[in-house]
Amino acid sequence: MRPHSFWRVGGWRWLLRGAAAAVLALVLLPLIYLLVRAAEAGPAALQLLFEARTLRVLARSVALALAVPLLSALLAVPLAWLTTRTDLPLRRMWAVVTALPLVIPSYIFAYLLVSVLGPRGLLQQLLQPLGVERLPDIEGFPGALLALTLLCYPYLLLTVRAALLTVDPALEEAGRSLGLTPWRTFVRITLPLLRPAFAGGGVLAALYTLRDFGAVSVMRYGTFTRVIYIQYQSAFDRSGAAVLALMLVALTIGLQALELNTRGRARYHRGHAAAKRKPMLVHLGRWRWPALLFCAAVALLGVGMPGAVLLFWLVRGLALGTPLPVLWSATGNSVYVCLVAAPLALLGALPLALLAGKQRSGGGRLVERVAYSAFALPGIVVGLALVFFGARYVPAIYQSVFLLQAGYLILFVPEAFGALRAALGSVNPSLMEAGRTLGRAPAQVLRSVTLPLMRNGVLAALAIVFLTAMKELPATLILAPPGMGTLATSIWGAVTQAYFAAAALPAVLLIGISSVPLAIFTLRETYQ
Amino acid sequence: MRTAGFRKVLLVGILAAEGILSGCGSRAPAGSGSAPSALPVPSGEVVLYSGREESLVAPLLLKFSTATGIPVKVKYGSTAELAATLLEEGSRSPADVFWAQDPGGLGAVAAADLLAPLPQKTLGLVPENFRSARGDWVGVSGRARVVVYNTNKVQPADLPSDMWGFTEPQWMGRIGWAPSNGSFQVMVTAMRKLWGEDKTRAWLQGIIANAAKEYPKNTPLVQAVASGEVEVGFANHYYLLQISKEEGTVLAAANYFLPGGGPGSLVMVAGVGQLATAPNSANAQRFIEYLLEPDAQRYFAQDTFEYPLIAGVEIAAGLQPLASLNTAALNVSDLIDTRGTIKLLKEVGALE
Amino acid sequence: MSDFAVECRGLTKSFDVVSAVRNLDLAVEQGEILVLLGPSGCGKTTTLRLIAGLEVPDAGSIRIGDQVVAGEGAFVATEKRRIGMVFQDYALFPHLSVSQNIAFGVQQRSSETRVQDGLRVVGLCGVGGRMPHELSGGQQQRVALARALAPHPAVLLLDEPFSNLDAGLRLQVRSEIRDILKANRLTAIFVTHDQDEALFMGDRIAVFNAGSLEQVGTPEELFFAPASRFVAEFMGQADFIRGETTEHGLQTEIGPVLQPVTLAVGQRVEVAIRADDVTLVADPQSKARVLGRSFRGAVNVYRVRLPSGRIVHSLQPHTLKLADGLLVRVQAEPGHPLAHFAI
């Protein structure tokens, strides 16, 4: 009935709006840059817009951006349910392992996928004794879909798991008491309650799909990002690339309209503290064998396969005496920039999440869509935009770590925003009002009440931004100051030139380091 | 206000960390530890934008720093990304030297008048057709276009003497290519120069009609030839050598240098140019000179399996000498029109 | 300067296009418990939130003590208004212990004694170390009160604080809380939709209807002299019968009532009459009929249909037994003037 205007009352709201406006302005920089460059193209830009080829690119991008979240949901929902609500053996291990593909850079993952599942890949060589001479081609749509689904389903897995852990078991018990079977209870009560989680995770998966360059280039599937990249490569046509990138932004905003509609009008936060109870675990019985098989198959494809090939490369390189680069500084740089990037993105996303959290007004939606639109921009666009503004207007920080951090902020605020908004939605607003009536200013309430209650969401945001930043490549290449290599840049350089052992070492390090926050976060995330 | 204090501490922490760590990423060994990341840096270093991958050039940069005492700060990236970055930076670039994988990137940057003319004594070290006609960039190593073939399935005698031969129907379903690869595009640029637009278009259509299988890059293409997924592939000569070395086995594939001349027997160069706005121009010149000294040229020959471009440096075992190749009579400046090439590739449907 | 603890003038607030509070004037005296009573959606909670500073008024002003906290160009933030608030869902911080909850609004130096005082006042010594979810509903309620009182607020705001308690507990807790408020001479504004609770808790009651005040007065005034039919109806247990004013009082369907009237003679009115104002005598000649009886322990409440079809209730000692269907004579013997409204 009454609107939740907590963050919008009193003088504090100007501070909040000021901070949000500053972050939005930064996030908008790439769009401004694109408009500047697209304007240079003049009428030719319009022509490019309506070419049949461009429309095919649009169709392919849409198809992939819709198919990846849908297929991801098919993997994520059973995994989330099995690891939170059943007596699946080694539940916690599966929870960690099945989330891990999130930490693998897409360009190396897709490369490994092709080298294993390609027509004459490792799998074919294993099957050779059985007379299999050739496997079907996976490149194009099926390969891109497979690679991106395996990379993106953890976004849904994490949000759906978090939602399953906060659904009030009383609601499901009510379903059972009304005569529903467990399965129908799941379909008619639990699944609808997971809607915000689907929407949140799905939009991240869709946007990541639109932004990704590695997987679509290896799989040679011509989505916007790949075409934009080729446009830059082709005689460095920045205007044409800008026109295409603007189309991508429009597409992103369109996709978000879908997401907002699915969230509907219901409110999903739980009543009060007293209601929290653990649900009964479902006894799997004989079903645990197919359940284990399912978890193992996903883990094998998503983690086991790339891990095994990387280790094989590394061991083979060591056996052949290939000199391996010392990676102290690249490791240090990666960890350091990401340790800064994660809290920075969180700070940037916080005012946006506070303002957008409950708001269904035009302003709130705008904040939300603008915040998200940057997430689908290819890193090269964000990188060049900051080069454009940085070199012109803030030469003092140009080609310094600060500009790289600004790039990460633009790229990762949307991710942090999604996680924070979801967490904020689950905090009962009267708790924050109670803090105010007890004499604490909004900023203090935020620190002593809201943030502690959002702890899981905050940790999730930190972990996700950290590991996405760890694997970010194109913007890092452009924005990192000369001399500052990261693990991601080391992998990329080596793998394109067939230095497999030299690629494997940083890849293994990167995956290992990123796994730590992800594992900590996943293991912490239980009923409280 | 405790909150304000908390924020301040966080901010100071970030600032301090930036200061401490900004210098530690340098690959170069000497004296760069305390250099602040902001530019311009007047001290004795050289800032390199390298479109060549770290694994190829990092050991050589180390040698340079050891030999001259000049630390190198490198920004790695693809040639296209770095060229786009340089174009956006314009005269505000912190870069001293741009080292590009192919002439196209250098050409785009040179066309925006961002490169300084090089001294004649530097230019004079390499043959005329391997340097820019305007004298603002110079080739430092060469890569030959070859046909990689599967030795189990194809005899050298069956291979045609020039690229046109692959449009014959007998190659149906046997070819692999990588049309989004920069080197391939340079070859097509050469084709357009030597054959004209129409014949080049006809060749591309002929290859597509032969159901050529597309690969994203040269490495997977050469691996596919070796595994027998396809029988021949259009690539650069050194991928086969690097993959053999990396996998520690003799691959079932070999390089075939087209004997008939023409665009298929092209030798392409990776080259360097000095930025007109280079903050450390003396060091930049020293660096470019170094790349053309025998020491560096030997590195290209032995470690990256490329062709040295100065006289008197031995090539890697298993390579045919540059002089014995029937190379196309083209100057590198003829090879910078990537834009037209991409247009043609899109027109025939080889690229999206 | 006013002597009021809280004073609202011309207070107006709407959400989107829905008007929640319209031009409201309201004053609370020092040490008084004022109850805001009305059906849901009437604006009483919005008024409370406006006083708390959780909403910004569109027009009008609010004064707490000597300070203008809203309106007249000022807006004082919630945390600076020296109010305490008890929420409908208690809003205890789930991540803090009971002691930490109570200490939340208190300066560091005095917190230990204040927590102990608070726990003692609400009779919960010894639970300070527990977490909120380990307490019963009634205990949570009392912790919420202790937390709101700990910073010694100038005025305490209570938003339907008992609605989550079961009936027995509600009666017990509300008398405890009234005792605490009175013992500490606290000024309090109390929101409820339950007139029984309002009559029990309030020194004065303000009845809301659709965003406006219908009447403010003591429980007795409201109960016996409702200013409008809405108030009479909402205060409960009133039946309405038709009547007409005479020189000496009212002439009704169940006979004359002698009382002073201000309306012109011959005015048709609706008369509010309660169960304790109505007597029943078995009378086979009468046309009124007993419809049913509900047992209330010491008393019985009978439901009777008058010849006009109107229903009235009558309170009778349990010693009197009237069978369903019995014809009875109905008489008004209020012993006080009856509220009546012109129609």
Image (tube, grey):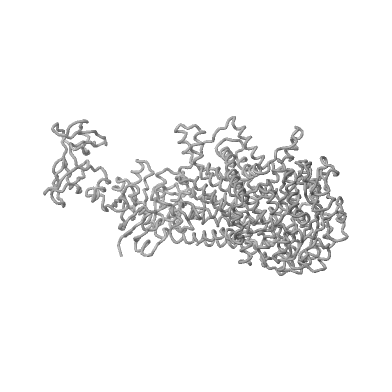
Horizontal arrangement in the rendering, residue B188 relative to residue A373 (left or right): right
Q: Quadrant of residue C72?
A: bottom left
Q: Nearer the viewer, residue A524 or A241?
A: A241
Q: Which of A176 and A245 is in front in this view?
A: A245
Task: Report the residue that reaches farthest toward the left.
Answer: C247
Horizontal arrangement in the rendering, residue C149 relative to residue B349 (left or right): left
Which residue is found at the position 83% from the left and 50% from the top? B258
Horizontal arrangement in the rendering, residue C256 relative to residue A517 (left or right): left
Q: Is residue A104 something one can see in this rendering? A: no
Question: Where does the image place residue A487, in percent across and percent down from the top left?
Answer: 69, 53
Q: Which of B83 and A316 is in front in this view?
A: B83
Question: Where does the image place residue C117, in percent across and percent down from the top left?
Answer: 41, 53
Number of labels in the image equals 0
Q: Nearer the viewer, residue C163 or A330?
A: A330
Tell me if residue A44 comes above or below residue B234 in the rendering: below
Tell me if residue B94 comes above or below residue A334 in the rendering: below
Task: Report the residue that reaches farthest toward the front.
Answer: B198
Horizontal arrangement in the rendering, residue A493 relative to residue A421 (left or right): right
Quarter occupied by the N terminus of chain C: bottom left
Q: Is residue A99 something one can see in this rendering? A: yes
Question: Where does the image place residue C228, in percent across and percent down from the top left?
Answer: 24, 50
Question: Where does the image place residue C288, in percent across and percent down from the top left?
Answer: 18, 35
Q: Quadrant of residue A82?
A: top right
